[in-house]
Structure formats: C-alpha cells, structure tokens
Amino acid sequence: MTTETAQRRASTAPLISARGVTVKFDVARTGKQMIALSNIDLDVMEGECVTVLGPSGCGKTTFMNVVAGLVKPTSGSVFIDGDEVSGPGPDRAVVFQDYALLPWRTVFDNVRFGLEMQKKLSDGDWRDRVQNAIDMVGLSGFESSYPRELSGGMQQRVGLARAFVAEPRILLMDEPLGAVDALTREVMRDEIGKLIAQTGKTVLFITHSIEEAILLGDRIVVFKSKPGEIKEIITTGIEGMGSERNAQNDERFHELREHLWSVLANEAAAASK
C-alpha cells in the first residue's frame, strides 16, 4: 500500500460498507432455517484488498454474493459508494473458482463476454480493450483457443481477463485458485498480487489458504461458523512480500500464519461439536 493510497483511505468514506448483514436460508428437508450470516459489519476502502478466511460453510461465499448483488440479505444492507446494493452492477465483477467459461467460445470471445454483459460493445475501442486484457494476464497468442484446449491455470487467466476488461471498481474473487494444482496456484497468486497492485482495484478475495490470505490481503477478515460471523479483522502489515518463498524469512508472516492456524483449528474443533 502506498502512502498516497493510505492518505486517500483515511480521508474518504468506505467504498464497500456492510451493515448488519444477516442471511437465512430455508432448509426444505428439516423445515427449519439455517443462518448463513449473522450481523456482519465490514468496511472496505477504495484500493484495498481484503481477504476473507474461514472454515468451510462459514458463509464467506454467501457474503461475497451479497456484495455482488446475487443474494439478497434477510436483514441488513450492503452499500457501494453510499448506494444500497439491490442487484448486480457494472461497478463489480466476479471471478469464480470453477472458471465459468463458455466452452463454445474462444479465449477472445470469452473475454469479450465481460463487455457484452456490461453492454459496452458500442465503445469504439472494445477490441483493443479485449486484447489488452488478454495481454495483461499473459495469454497473448491464445486468442483463438477454446477452453478445452487450455490448462486449468490458463482458463482461470481467461476468467481474470473477463473481469478486468469491463474495468469495474471492485473485483470479487471466490476461491479463484482453488481448482488449480499447487505449483500453478503459487505462480498465479503472485501474478494476481501484481495485477491488483498494477490496477489499484478494490478487491474482496475469498480463500481457504492462510498463506494466500496473508500475502494478498491488506487486511484479513476471519469468519467463524454456525452462524457465520466475523471473529476478527487483522491488518497484515506486510508490503511487497511477493511469493511465499520470499516471505519465509519474514517474522511477521510466520507470526500471522501461526496465529491464523490456531484460530482456524479452534473454529474447526468447535464446529465439529
């Protein structure tokens, strides 16, 4: 985080503001309600990357879907730049874990879909914007390839390019590296960190990986389960760390990792009772 970014955050209102967000789902099998989220309050400043960490089933993805406008809260609200979220909007783009590519479309046309969804194909420079997004994620030369011809990591790059091409203010990433192998995950984590820094986007990043949460996040929001609530929010205080290998000699990285392991282990034990 640069000094300029920090000063801007200190003098402006949050870009994303969640107040009392509660989500309940009806469970047909039991006839009861399940509380997925309970009274979530969270502010995210413009240009900030907030990682959300917690055990499976704690409501992380549900919260992201509320911010995206895909799930309506049972009570409470989310505001984007002061306006209440009532549905999806061009100010937000979602990157999914399962790539969500259209198999009958080429790389170029899948990325173009990001502009189609925002009705921005009338812009005269849309072809250049699509190509620039493809170049940015390192897929130059694969414009005519189909998803079936790409590795998992390359497919996720297409998903990233599709999100970036529409130039949203906010990127919502739901376990975007969860479906790739360990080596690809480390490489892409570093590349995503560079893209976030390069573009200055506001990011809400859902993850199960402690290392990912530390290396990418300005702050880490730890969720607890049953029901999903915020357990704690941690400012990482780590800048320019880059890869996990570079972080191995950093005392703060190890301190955070040990603390988060302990917190999540306790949550997992409590959830199993």
Image: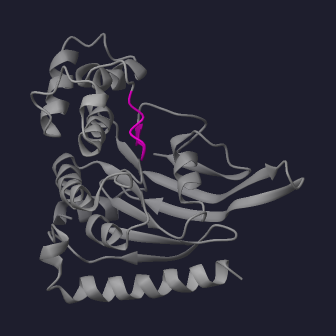
Q: Which residues are magenta?
A: 92-101
Work out whether residue 67 or residue 17 is closer to the camera in this orientation and state it.
67
Quarter of the view holding residue 158: top left
The residue at the point 39 percent across, 63 percent down is 51
Instruction: Measuring from the top left, give residue 217's x and y in whole percent.
Output: 32, 66
Q: How many marks?
A: 0
Q: Is residue 99 magenta?
A: yes
Residue situated furthest right in the rendering:
31
263 relative to 102, above or below: below
Residue sitting nearer the eye, 55 or 153: 153
Toward the left, the furthest residue is 141
Asked whether the viewer can see residue 166, the reply is: no
Residue drawn at point x = 14 percent, y = 74 percent: 245
Q: Please report the residue visible at 32 percent of the width from the left and 61 percent of the height from the top.
A: 9
Residue at screen point 55% across, 46% down = 65
93 magenta-colored: yes
Residue 40 placement, left or right of 108: right
Q: Position of residue 157 (x, y in %)?
A: 25, 40
Looking at the figure, which quarter contains the C terminus? bottom right
Q: Position of residue 50 (x, y in %)?
A: 38, 62
Query: Looking at the figure, which quarter contains the N terminus?
Result: bottom left
> Nearest the camera: 174 or 92?
174
The spot of residue 15 in percent (x, y) is 42, 51
Q: Main secondary structure of the magenta part?
A: loop
Identify the coloring. one colour
> In the rendered image, is residue 209 in sight?
yes
